Amino acid sequence: MDKFLTFTIVGLATSAIYAVIASGLVLTYTTTGIFNFAQGAIGMLAAFTYWQLRFSWGWPTPVALIVVLFVLAPLFGILIDRVIMRGLQDTSETTKLVVSISLLIGMIGLAQIIWDPNVSRPYATFFATSKPLAIGPTTITWHQLITIAVAIAVAIGLRFLLYATRIGIAMRAAVDDRPLATLNGARPHRVSMFAWAIGSSLAALGGILIAPLVPLEAGTLSLLIISAYAAAIFGRLRSFPLVFVGAIVVGCTEGYLSGYLPQNQYLPGLRLASPAILLFIVLLLLPNPRLRGRTRSREFFPMPSRRGALGFAAGVTAAGVVLATTMSQPDLVTYGRVFSVGIIALSLVPLVGFAGQVSLCQLSFAGIGAIVMAHLGHNGNPIALVWAVLITAAIGAVIALPALRLSGIYLALGTAAFAIALDRWIFTLPKFSVFGLFNIDLFQQGSVSVDPLRLFGFTFDTPGSQMVLLSSVFALLSLLVVAIRRGRFGRRLLAMKDSEAACATLGLNLLGTKVTVFALSAGMAGLGGALLGSQLSSVSPQNFDLVTGLPIFALAVVGGIGAAGGALFGAVSLAGLLPLLAALLPSVSQYLVILPGLAGIGLGRNPNGAVHDLREGFMPIAKSRIVLVATVVVLAGLYAIRMLDAIDNWTYALLTMTTPLVAVVAATLLRRERADGVVPLEWRGVTEPWTDDDVRDLDRVLGLTEVELHGAARG
Amino acid sequence: MAQLAVRGVTVRFGGNVALDGVDLDADPGMVTGLIGPNGAGKTTLFNVITGLIPLNSGSIQLNGAPMNDLSPTKRARRGLARTFQRLELFSLLSVRENIRVAADIRKGWARDGSDPAAVTEALIERIGLGAVADARVDALPTGQCRLVELGRSLATRPEVLLLDEPASGQDENETLAFGALLQELAAEGMAVVLVEHDVHLVMRVCHKVHVLDFGRIIAVGDPQQIQTNPAVVAAYLGTPG
């Protein structure tokens, strides 16, 4: 009984923190429609800032608290609202999600820049030196008591705010019907600013309360509050009382798990993963949603042409060959991940781009693919690739089963929870057997080695050969993706993305379609993971965790998730440009970690993706046959000169990158010149003065002879 | 036996009774009208029939077989198709692709050896959208969008077709052609249910009209009877002049 009481108190104190953070989340979600994935990260930054003020600079506790909770946090919330979130009206849920995920990535990066992750930071609880209070047979610490009291105060405060203040009533009105509230004089900008300020303060409060109980580490702290997400979902992202009930359920479950879970080698991970598993369960308990009708959004991804797809695939393969033959071995190792990451990013295109189903666990599928390759691909046996695809596709299909009930933000959270459950528990398991039939060995509680792939008697054991292999596989898969987009299945996915309700009333099996696209996408990610594994030669769970996977997702969306080019853009930015910048500018390399975040945050301005603009920009080359041929010839010539060692790599890279730019200018000038030569007939005399030549042209076109027109008069 | 038989359907949203014991029959070869003021429950009834929202009591039968427990997908496969008042077109696709998706889906479940490409072209021809077949539907005016939805639902070759305000956004000539098309469809044996505010169209093409007001059917009859029914005049049609 004592033990039960002790863990109830632990559970309630944790619940209180979750309740505070979750109410902030619900407040911003209901008033602005944006689910702030970075809510935990705001708490994390606040915890670090508080540490800095209170423990590093030695400010008095009340001053430090007031500065963080009532000045910095609300200002930060307002900044996020003004600079980032306001541009997200009418964008798809995917875009909103990517922006807030990018904010999360950027903030983790920011914290790591400011507070060196390798330094340990002691963080005392409130009244740490005071004696705990006795409650019957057990005790409660002052920190726990304060935490619970704070949650109760927040609950009362929110109730008062929403029901007894003008701004609170405006907030509730905005939740019900935003345009109507505006018509009635509410000012939505002010309301959303206020919501972000309070939401951010609540996150900060939760962060400061939770920080002493866990290691002060940016990533852990930001994701720790996945339990708060579970509480928020329990409240259906609307009801504050239910959010508090949800927080108590989640917090106490965690408390009891830490008290009563038997100690053996399989279960410690389960305790760490329990918030994610709880979140998954809560998501599944949501009432069956109505089928989604049409959603209006700004995004549009045009249909790729056959010619364009073939050109793209040829270009990618050629790029692989060029990189493999020109780069040094260390460079090939540094930049070699471009195409394997590219394949994983490409797996998102049919799923997110075409079908509109968000998945944050693609890198986890890749991890499973890598495990399969490690254990079944001895001596590079290529059959392991087939197994990697089949096994990940099967797991993807199983994950998709609950996905019929989930969409948008709920699906994103569900897949993130799956990824966390794998990271924290499954991937750390020792060898085990299922019903004594299968022995399953994963990462062997550390890392596993993966043999290089062997195909048709050739072993891909050099970085160069792997680069060629991976670029070719990427190119082939990009053709597959285009074929899907142009075919029956692709049309069906796009239709489902637009309106599930309409698809159902046409007799489409929604579950079957979703399961198929999830399996396809997971299989592609599994293949990418298997190839990445054989490239890295040794893999561990850290290669495949959620936080590592988020930038791939974010940057692929920034590139343009509706096209293979977008996936390549994401991979090149992440595995190519970032290491390149770090090599070129070593002095600022530590600041580069926030770049993916910044790129994602900028997405709201251009939801169609960067590749869309790039394609438009380079289109003149494709339209002018002469320029196109000349460009290819020049590029081939440069490559030949490089192979003869007449120029070094830097010159070659510079000239190669300049060539398309020059080609665009040439193609544009050429077109303008042609257009200049011929003024359309209907514009003669309008844009320029009327001349005798124009008269003759007009006569000729109308089929009139000189005599018919002017005969008598001239005569 | 009517092809589509709705019996005593009641739907509540919280405390609001949206539909209150509604009966409706739709017979093959006939255009059945469903009229009533905005908010009377017409679209809700369509949503209930197609299974998009659950009913609280009552039954829906297609060819004598109960459909209450079937998903929207299964109902569609039994021969039910609809259009939407608030357009539910696939905006990322062209007119042709919108119809082709439906034809492909039908072929997937019916396995009847039909050629979806040919079905699509024939429908584009029939509803007169040849000139804009390759345009993205987002670029089309509402009247044409409604035709695309009609074409899309016809591509599943339904026995019962529910049309939710299909003529809104169409001009007079388009409405005339549209009315003729509806009569043709009925003549081919389809049971058509038409929700429409264009009373002239309803009275011209419908064989039978149901009038819905505040969730209740207040009158059923042929167009002549409906136009002179005092309750209908009071609730919806109004008196001329």
Image (tube, grey):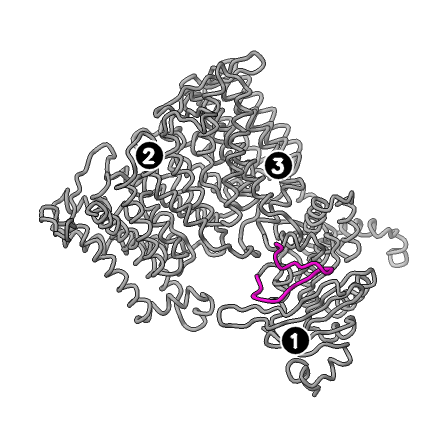
Residue receiving disc 3: A482
Q: Are marks 1 and 2 on the same chain?
A: no
User: Which element is circle 1 on?
Assistant: strand
Out of A488 and A314, give the one closest to the viewer. A488
The three-letter amino acid code for the residue at tag 2 is Leu
Q: CA distance from mark 3 to mark 1?
A: 51 Å
Nearer to us in this view, A51 or A322: A51
- Seen in the image, is B179 located left or right of residue A497? right
Q: Amino acid at mark 1?
A: Ile
Specify the quadrant of the image occupied by residue A211: top left
Q: Residue at x 62, y 34 (%)?
A: A309
Q: Is residue B154 left or right of residue A311?
A: right
Estimate how packed mark 2 is, as few (under 14), some (14 to 19) or many (20 or more) residues with alpha carbons within 10 Å.
some
Residue A396 versus residue A207 in the image, above or below = above
Q: Residue furthest bottom?
A: B241
Which residue position holds label 1?
A: B217
Within the image, what quadrant is residue B219 found in? bottom right
Occupied quadrant, residue A23: bottom left
Q: Position of residue A78 (x, y in %)?
A: 32, 56
- The crowding category of the residue bearing disc 3, from other C-alpha atoms within 10 Å (few below 14, some 14 to 19, many at least 20), is many
According to the picture, the residue beneath numbered tag 2 turns out to be A267
User: What range of the chain is rendered magenta?
Assistant: B54-71
